[in-house]
Amino acid sequence: MKTLFNTVLVASLCMSSSTFAAQIVGHRGASFDAPENTLSSFKLGYKQNADADELDIHLTKDGKVVVMHDYDMARTGGEKLKVSEHTLEELRALDIGKWGKWQGKGFSEKIPLLEEVLALIPDGKRLFIEIKCGPEVLPELANVLKKAGKKPEQTVIIGFGYETMQAAKEKFPNLEVNWLVQADKKKVFPPVEDLIAKSKAAKLDGLDLNQGFPIDKQFVDKVHAAGLKLYTWTVDDPIVAKAEAEAGVDGITTNRPGWMREQLAAKS
Ligand code: G3P
Ligand code: CA
């Protein structure tokens, strides 16, 4: 009887300590294992059992919502075409699967439309959509989201532009809209109280903070007490991820979603 009791006790302790509630978000997809912000990267993110993928959007000259981190195609496509000054067809002439370490790895990728990525989201999984441009994208974003017909909880809007996030929340009251914040030019991290006050003033749903913020349980509790969610990026160090998960963050954005989940399970 005592042995059975001990077994049950150990099993339940293991279960409680091995379960991190934090979602794992694939940064630009599974961008450690496939070229960032491509369909291959997003498919792989979900295949690696990420709870969500994250991507960056811009508006093309012909009004399409496309997925790209930079404002131009120089780094990933080899030609300095500014996304907002070219049509989808012109941008799609470039292969964004062969730059840097991806040369010779067999990838051939075109700049994705947001609608193509929305169509990949498995049931129960989410997509974090970072608005890199300004509010001019919102009307077409609304069309694309409506056409995709995903459940409201499956798409999350994020962005650094405070006014753009405020406008996004007004446009999409049913969607989660979170404000991205990093250190200022002098490498100073704004106080969490200020971030909470600004988020509440804009009726946003949460904060999405860069590595370096002093995130511990007290910090997370303050954000949660204000009714806000808290995500972090870009966390590829399992020690940092574990500390943040234990502190109670809602999600961790990483380039290595599958590997990070394994690391967290091993550390629990
Ligand atoms: O998920 C937020 C993060 O992606 C913001 O930084 O430069 O990678 O878009 P960046
Ligand atoms: Ca991003």
Image (cartoon, helix red, strand yellow):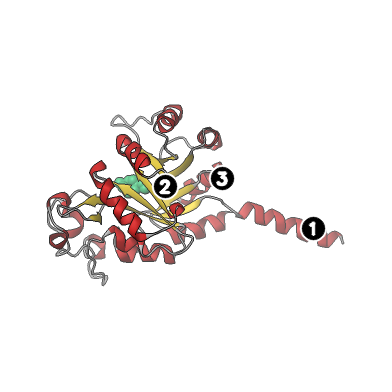
Q: Is residue 243 visible?
A: yes
How far is disc 2 from disc 1 in space, using C-alphas?
46 Å
In the depicted view, which residue is nearer to us: 91 or 149? 149
Quarter of the image where one finds residue 104:
bottom left
**Residue lying at 21% horizontally and 57% vertically, measured from the top left:** 76
Distance Cα–Cα, label 3 vs label 1: 25 Å
Give the residue displayed 46% in from the left and 35% down from the top: 214
Query: Mark 3 or mark 2, which has the lower sequence index?
Result: 2
Residue type at numbered disc 2: Leu
- Per the image, label 2 sits on a secondary structure element best described as loop
Residue 160 place in picture, x, y as percent: 32, 39
Q: Name the disc covering residue 246, or none.
A: 3
Which residue in the protein does label 2 denote? 175
As shown in the figure, which amino acid type bears the numbered disc 1?
A: Asn
- Within 10 Å of disc 2 (Cα), the crowding (few <14, some 14-19, many 20+) is some
Q: Residue 34, how many percent across, how many down?
A: 32, 64
Q: Helix, strand, or loop for circle 3?
A: helix
Q: Amino acid at mark 3?
A: Glu
What percent of the width, then of the height, locates residue 184? Answer: 31, 31
For residue 6, which numbered disc appears in the image?
1
- Give the side of residue 218 with respect to residue 207, left or right: right
From the image, state whether disc 3 or disc 1 is nearer to you: 3
Q: Give the quadrant of the N terminus.
A: bottom right
> Image point 71% across, 59% down: which residue?
11
Q: Is 199 situated left or right of 87 in this image?
A: right
Q: Nearer the viewer, residue 50 or 135?
A: 135
Give whichever of discs 3 and 1 has the lower sequence position: 1
Q: Nearer the viewer, residue 48 or 138?
A: 138
Could one spot residue 210 in this view of the protein?
no
